[in-house]
Amino acid sequence: MKQYILEMEEYANEHNVPIIEKDSIAYIMKYIKKNNVKSILEIGSAIGYSSILMASANPETVVTTIEKDEARYMECLKNVKKCNMENKVHVVFQDALDLNLDPNNKYDLIFIDAAKGQYMKFFEKYKYFLSDNGVIITDNLKFHGYVGKSEKIESKNLKGLVTKIENYIEFLKDNEEFDTKFFDLGDGLSFSTKKNASK
Ligand code: SAH
Ligand code: MG
């Protein structure tokens, strides 16, 4: 499998696919092992890099991952198959904001890593699917160093996006239901747990 992971890193590099940074995924994999995470929901599969690595962290872990771009979805399926992970990684081809999951499904870990401007929507939609002691992890909170500097950005689109990430960070900090820890790892990572959780 290691060979395929390296090939995915090369592919991502060549095709500008924004896969998770190594220190971030290493930290998440450690969390999965330590907390015996069994079920994961990922929003934003891209080519399957983070889903395959998360699924490999613990023999019992199963990942459901959602991707709306068809080409990436196809690439993701190909990689899951190559790595013999068809039983552990289920790829759903849909826009995560349109998908209706079975409300009885609960996940120990929800990884938000899709469109950065929609983070708050993903969080509000999917928090109902988190198990009581579960965690919602969000990636790219630094957005390549732009976050916190939106006022100085000239490009309107970029400024809008960065402002949305800044607002999301404030939303997490002020949240009444969730406690959030921020980590200065990779492109910036947050871990949000329910305030009433037993651990
Ligand atoms: N988690 C991957 C990287 C994901 S990149 C990894 O670290 O390996 C973000 C992906 O989210 C892109 O492929 C993009 O097409 C997808 N995406 C963006 N908005 C989405 C949405 N609303 N629903 C599903 N996928 C979405
Ligand atoms: Mg990311």
Image (tube, rainbow, N blue to C red):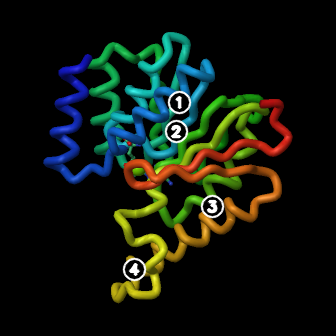
Whether ligand 1 has any atom under 8 Å from the Cβ at mark 1 is answered as: no
Q: CA distance from mark 4 to mark 2?
A: 26 Å
- The secondary element bearing badge 1 is classed as strand
Extreme residue toward the right, this view:
196
Tell me the residue that label 1 is attached to. Answer: 64
Question: Foreground: 10 or 69?
Answer: 10
Q: Residues within 10 Å of mark 1 (few under 14, many from 20)?
A: some
Which comes before the other along the chain, label 3 or label 4?
3
Tell me the residue that label 2 is attached to. Answer: 42
Tell me the residue that label 4 is attached to. Answer: 157
Give the amino acid at mark 4: Asn
Which comes before the other along the chain, label 1 or label 3?
1
Position of residue 174 in the picture relative to residue 84 (left or right): right
Which comes before the other along the chain, label 2 or label 3?
2
Tell me the residue that label 3 is attached to. Answer: 120
Which comes before the other along the chain, label 1 or label 4?
1
Confirm whether residue 127 shows in the render.
yes
- The secondary element bearing badge 3 is classed as helix
Q: Are marks 1 and 2 in contact (CB under 8 Å)?
A: yes
Residue 108 at what x, y percent from top left? 66, 29
The nearer-to-camera label among 1 and 3 is 3
Residue name at image x 39 percent, y 27 percent: 53
Give the amino acid at mark 2: Glu
Residue 159 at what x, y percent from top left? 43, 80
Work out whether 143 lies above or below 101.
below
